[in-house]
Amino acid sequence: MPVLFCHGLESSPQGRKVQALRAAGLEVIAPDFQGQNLAARVATLLPVLRAHPDALVIGSSYGGITALCAAILHSEAGGSVRGLLLCAPALGRYESPADALRLYPPAPTVILHGRRDSVVPVQVSEDFAAAHPEVRLELVDDDHRLNASLERMLALTHELLAATTPQPAA
């Protein structure tokens, strides 16, 4: 089953995280969001979600808010999302469509965030997890890129793939 990967603002669909996922033998679909704002990213991701309803969605940084917004919209339209792994997600970016959505986890959700992140404050993830007790928050001794935590990202990916089934709309 595929993994949908949403890269960050200054990354690409060929970044380190995608390479690590592919090297682990996973089928990765990584749309190219380069140069797109959040609304355009979500619009790009929605048809991919519809085409792969059993996919686990992973989002990194700006790709994290992209993944969350698209998963919410997809679920509310009757689609299903297997799960979400959000890596240092930019959950504090309040621009369209995030500014008009009630942000919540529409599927089993894990957040992986570095304690030394100087780009997206770890407090953003802590606040989201506190507001949504069903969200699992894993803090690691790493920075925003999570380069030292790629093995943990892979382990969490495998855990989510093994533990979840596609979730129908709430």
Image (cartoon, rainbow, N blue to C red):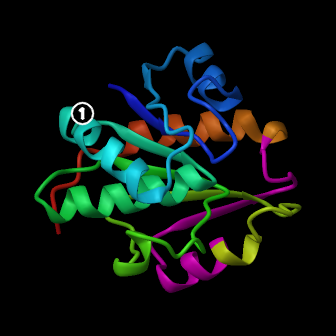
- The quarter of the rendered structure image containing the N terminus is top left
SS category of the residue bearing label 1: loop
Using the image, determine if residue 42 lies above or below residue 10: below
In the rendered structure, does residue 64 fall within the stretch colored magenta? no
Q: Nearer the viewer, residue 79 or 163?
A: 79
Judged left or right of residue 8, residue 6 is left
| Residue located at (22% from left, 55% from top) | 74
- The quarter of the rendered structure image containing the C terminus is bottom left
| Residue located at (39% from left, 68% from top) | 105
| Residue located at (83% from left, 61% from top) | 117
Range of residues picked out in magenta: 125-146
Using the image, determine if residue 83 lies above or below residue 14: below
Judged left or right of residue 161, residue 143 is right
| Residue located at (81% from left, 37% from top) | 147
In the rendered structure, does residue 129 fall within the stretch colored magenta? yes
The residue beneath circle 1 is: 52
Q: Position of residue 162 (x, y in %)?
A: 40, 37
Quadrant in the rendering for residue 20: top right
Q: Position of residue 62 (x, y in %)?
A: 59, 55
Q: Position of residue 95 (x, y in %)?
A: 49, 72
Tell me the amino acid under the disc marked 1. Answer: His
Q: Nearer the viewer, residue 7 or 106?
A: 7
Q: Position of residue 75 (x, y in %)?
A: 21, 59
Using the image, determine if residue 21 lies above or below residue 85: above
Judged left or right of residue 76, residue 95 is right
